Image (cartoon, rainbow, N blue to C red):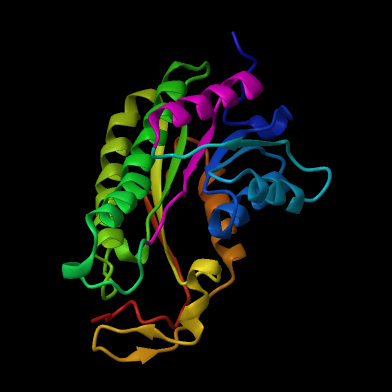
């Protein structure tokens, strides 16, 4: 039987264990560094090893332990290997931050979107999130003490789309259904599932928004962004709640972005 941690782990000194997908850049990197700084043991997952190593190096000395695992979340065998590596190294899993995702080709009208591009977005954003949640669910259900937390990275687009974003928006709406279903099914096993919907965090993906983003009325206008560290702190707050409490949905956005009233 593994030596494991309970909800009052702060008093025992045993680190909590997290998996962060898409940890090589952007929101995934910021969340991984935040958790490592707080003393969590974190498995950093992504398709490219070098950015994962850079994320591990960005955490301050004296924090938690980082494990880098190359994994494409759209491939079931690589997801299985990822969670097997976490189990072998750390013995349990307390948190999955389901973050890996792609916007796909930007600004492509629906009638021109190649099927291959649609399929890539669905495989990464939805199928990948399901595969990782399923693997985490299985481990959390069987470990002792049982339970854990899954936080899915939704988006403002889980509520309201941008122009020419059919694949991304469809997957993010679907992710909300995944979150609700997992949350319900996890109750008997102490598995809490929530979702963070993020708007205009300053990352490489949103770099162009400050110079101009297409609006629903057809105009292009600059949009404000927020510090990605504010997202990371929100995820950490959600992650460190006792399993008896859950943030089901959190929306974190640049205060003045055109979301409320979009369209």
Q: How many marks?
A: 0
Residue 245 seen: no
The x and y percentages for residue 109 are 22, 73
Residue 69 lies within the magenta run: no
The x and y percentages for residue 89 are 65, 22
Query: Relative to the observer, which residue lies in front, 43 or 251?
Result: 43
Give the quadrant of the C terminus.
bottom left
Q: Residue furthest top?
A: 1
- Snapshot quadrant of residue 66: top right
Please report the residue visible at 55 percent of the width from the left and 71 percent of the height from the top. 202
Q: Which residues are magenta?
A: 75-103
In the rendered image of this protein, does residue 242 appear above or below residue 224?
above
Q: Is residue 174 left or right of residue 4?
A: left
Q: Residue furthest right?
A: 61
In the rendered image of this protein, does residue 248 appear above or below residue 182?
below
Residue 219 seen: yes
Please report the residue visible at 57 percent of the width from the left and 48 percent of the height from the top. 23
Please report the residue visible at 40 percent of the width from the left and 34 percent of the height from the top. 75
Residue 101 lies within the magenta run: yes
The x and y percentages for residue 234 are 54, 57
Please report the residue visible at 36 percent of the width from the left and 49 percent of the height from the top. 125
- Snapshot quadrant of residue 223: bottom left
Give the quadrant of the N terminus.
top right
Q: Is residue 147 left or right of residue 69?
A: left
The x and y percentages for residue 246 are 42, 44
Query: Relative to the observer, which residue lies in front, 148 or 31?
Result: 31
In the rendered image of this protein, does residue 122 appear above or below residue 170?
above
Q: Residue furthest left?
A: 111
């Amino acid at each position: 039987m593994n030596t494991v941690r309970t909800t009052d782990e702060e008093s025992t000194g045993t680190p909590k264990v997290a998996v962060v997908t898409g940890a090589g850049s952007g929101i995934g990197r910021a969340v991984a560094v935040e958790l490592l700084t707080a003393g969590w043991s974190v498995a950093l997952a992504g398709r490219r090893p070098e950015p994962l190593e850079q994320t591990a190096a960005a955490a301050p000395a004296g924090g938690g332990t980082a494990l880098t695992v190359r994994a494409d979340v759209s491939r079931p065998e690589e997801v299985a290997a990822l969670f097997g590596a976490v189990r072998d190294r750390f013995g349990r899993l307390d948190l999955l931050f389901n973050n890996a995702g792609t916007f796909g080709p930007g600004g492509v009208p629906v009638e021109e979107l190649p099927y291959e591009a649609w399929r890539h977005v669905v495989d990464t954003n939805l199928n990948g999130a399901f595969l990782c949640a399923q693997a985490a669910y299985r481990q959390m259900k069987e470990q002792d003490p049982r339970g854990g937390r899954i936080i899915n990275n939704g988006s403002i687009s889980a509520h309201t789309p941008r122009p020419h974003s059919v694949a991304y928006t469809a997957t993010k709406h679907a992710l909300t259904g995944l979150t609700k279903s997992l949350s319900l099914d996890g109750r008997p096993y102490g598995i809490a599932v929530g979702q963070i919907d993020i708007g205009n965090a300053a990352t490489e993906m949103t770099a162009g928004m400050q110079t101009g983003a297409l609006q629903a009325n057809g105009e292009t206008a600059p949009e404000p962004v927020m510090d990605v560290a504010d997202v990371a702190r929100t995820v950490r707050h959600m992650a460190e709640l006792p399993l008896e409490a859950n943030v089901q949905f959190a929306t974190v956005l640049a205060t003045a972005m055109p979301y409320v009233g979009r369209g």
